[in-house]
């Protein structure tokens, strides 16, 4: 026997609220609720893992495609650089019938011609080369620019070209 006596006061009132025998509440619904929550959590985790794996596959495919496109871009840039090289430009210009100019003439701000313009030499037949990769139609031949004779050194400009001064 315990050394305690009957409960008094507040403890007695609380003791009346407690069941006094074996538990009559069914534990089956609680166990089913816990199992359902655990099962739902596992299924959610499986779906989340599948979605992440699918995203990972998509990401690796995009990385592979990016690598391919980068390689293609570099190859195209090499082609552009090769076409822009001075020797390639000269070869293409000669194929088009262009010739290098000798000494150019320039115009000063006051209209004076500096230098002696000379006519470019007649184009020579281009050497037999492989056809160019450019598929654009050949330009129509243009007439040669007229050669301007430089004014004599002692010539004075016309009166209309002389600078005017205003009295203001």
Image (tube, rainbow, N blue to C red):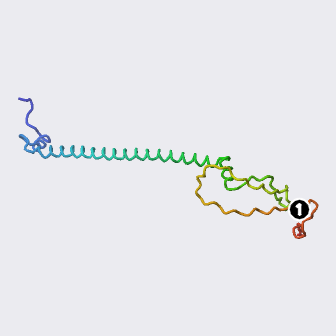
Q: In the picture, which quadrant includes the N terminus?
A: top left
Give the vertical position of 44 relative to 1 (above or below).
below
Pick whichever, 104 or 138, lies toward us: 138
Q: Residues within 10 Å of mark 1 (few under 14, many from 20)?
A: few
> Mark 1 sits on what residue?
151
Residue at 28%, 47% (x, y): give it.
Answer: 47
Q: Quarter of the image holding residue 138?
A: bottom right
Q: Secondary structure at mark 1?
A: loop
Q: Quarter of the image holding residue 149?
A: bottom right
Pick whichever, 116 or 132, lies toward us: 132
Direction from residue 66 to residue 23 in the image, left or right: left
Residue at 57%, 47% (x, y): give it.
Answer: 77
Direction from residue 139 to residue 63 in the image, left or right: left
Q: In the picture, which quadrant includes the C terminus?
A: bottom right
Q: Quarter of the image holding residue 60?
A: top left
Expressed as whole percent of the image width and height from the top left, the position of residue 55 reads: 36, 47
Pick whichever, 19 or 85, lies toward us: 85
Expressed as whole percent of the image width and height from the top left, the position of residue 120 reads: 78, 55
Residue at 9%, 32% (x, y): give it.
Answer: 4
């Amino acid at each position: 026997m315990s050394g305690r006596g009957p409960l008094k006061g507040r403890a007695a009132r609380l003791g009346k609220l407690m069941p006094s025998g074996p538990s009559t509440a069914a534990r089956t619904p609680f166990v089913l609720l816990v199992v359902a929550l655990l099962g739902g959590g596992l299924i959610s985790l499986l779906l989340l893992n599948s979605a992440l794996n699918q995203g990972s596959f998509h990401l690796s495919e995009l990385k592979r495609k990016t690598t391919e496109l980068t390689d293609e871009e570099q190859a195209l840039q090499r082609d552009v650089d090769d076409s822009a090289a001075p020797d390639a430009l000269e070869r293409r210009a000669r194929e088009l019938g262009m010739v290098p100019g000798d000494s150019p003439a320039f115009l000063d701000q006051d209209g004076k011609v500096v230098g002696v313009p000379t006519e470019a030499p007649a184009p020579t037949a281009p050497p037999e080369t492989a056809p160019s990769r450019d598929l654009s139609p050949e330009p129509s031949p243009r007439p040669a620019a007229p050669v301007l004779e430089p004014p004599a050194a002692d010539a004075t400009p016309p009166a209309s070209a002389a600078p005017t001064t205003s009295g203001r």
